Amino acid sequence: MTVPSFFDLEISLIRELRKYCDVHVLMIISPESIHSSAFDIHKLCPEPKIINGQDFEEINKYQTFIDLKYWNIANNPDNSFISCFKLAKQIKEFIKTEEFDLIHSTTDCKTSVFLLPFIFRFKNTLFTEHDPIPHHKMNRFREFISYNLSFICFKNVLLLSDSLLEQFKGKFKGYYKTIYQSGLSIYDFLKSYPKVSNKYGDYILFFGRIDRYKGVDLLINAYRQSNAYKKGIKLIIAGRANSDFSVPENNAILLFNRYIPNEELAGLIDNSLFVVLPYKSATQSGCVFSAFAFDKPILATNVGDIPKQVNNNTGCLIEPNDVVGIKEGINYMLHADYGKLTTYIHNLYSDKGERSWGCIAKHLVEDIYNKIVKGE
């Protein structure tokens, strides 16, 4: 059970999971989520109902990645209290009818809150927490729902990062029987889009939603002091800002402050020299796995789990909140051995690589799902 914001990573994960077990997907959508990364549809059905994924023409383009017969869309037309209640009732009946052995949820969306009493009574449940400690300050009600009530009702939790494991255990002590760990791999669906020609020349790339913790302000200052700027290599910043954001008027810095469709994003990554992620804080980042889908090296900061993916073999790691460090990192990456870096990335995340989705799915089924169902 999931939501569109995780569709880009779950396309590949579900594909591999189905090689090891029978998986059905229930994706809860609402007006706020119909344009979310890889999941992008034009309109919702006017009533709360569960619809098979084959009936959504917009996601048929992913049929080579996923078997749409096993993807169901839980349609919430307006995200109102009544719609959430009606849809949650249908979801409960769907789960009862199919007689599933385990419910694995990655969402605490509004509709899922109405399912929590049912989840609490279900024998085998697992909740994936993408941000063990939230980046942003949440209102108390939202925090209670997301980080208290949901954790009480699910019997097990899955973390995709161990960088905040001890802090997480301390804050939510006693909520779980077991805390499991897994990881992410490349967003390989991005490679399904047609290649596009480069119309910007040589450039380095930052992409993703622009938040305060992303360090874009530091990147701009560092870039203007770097050899990339002096050599005429552009900086492209691609992603919608959460607040007012602008860059100094400069032909060398291109700001695309808007939603970036995946077709465009794939081209931006593929044609870049390398990707820069100057985060001030983070748990993990899907941007890492989008860049690695194209074997692109990354300049990133030493925060969260990012050092597990970015190192001397895959790019360059620097300390956070350091303009001089970012500048020196850019200068270093301009002379890096790209052939060596891209080969290492490709071998690590390819079908038989140790960090492939296949390895992650096998671990999830054999070491987590089976243990939960067998009560081990």
Image (spheres, rainbow, N blue to C red):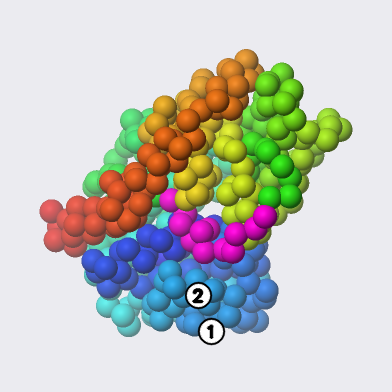
Whether 91 is drawn above or below 196: the answer is: below
Using residue 50 as the reference point, say whether residue 364 is left or right of it: left
> Secondary structure beneath disc 1?
helix
**Residue pictured at 39% horizontal, 49% vertical:** 185
Graded by Cα atoms within 10 Å as few (under 14), some (14 to 19) or many (20 or more), the crowding at tag 1 reads few
Extreme-top residue of the structure: 324
**Residue pictured at 67% horizontal, 38% vertical:** 203
Q: Name the residue under label 2.
A: 73
Whether 305 is drawn above or below 350: the answer is: above
Three-letter code for the amino acid on which mark 1 is drawn: Asp
In magenta stretch: residue 130: no
**Residue pictured at 68% horizontal, 46% vertical:** 239
User: What whole-number distance in Å separates the C-alpha atoms at marks 2 and 1?
Assistant: 9 Å
Q: Which of marks 2 and 1 is nearer the N terminus?
A: 1
Residue 313 coordinates in the image, percent (x, y): 39, 31
Query: Magenta residues?
Result: 186-197
Extreme-right residue of the structure: 249
Residue 319 coordinates in the image, percent (x, y): 51, 20
In the picture, the disc for residue 55 is 1
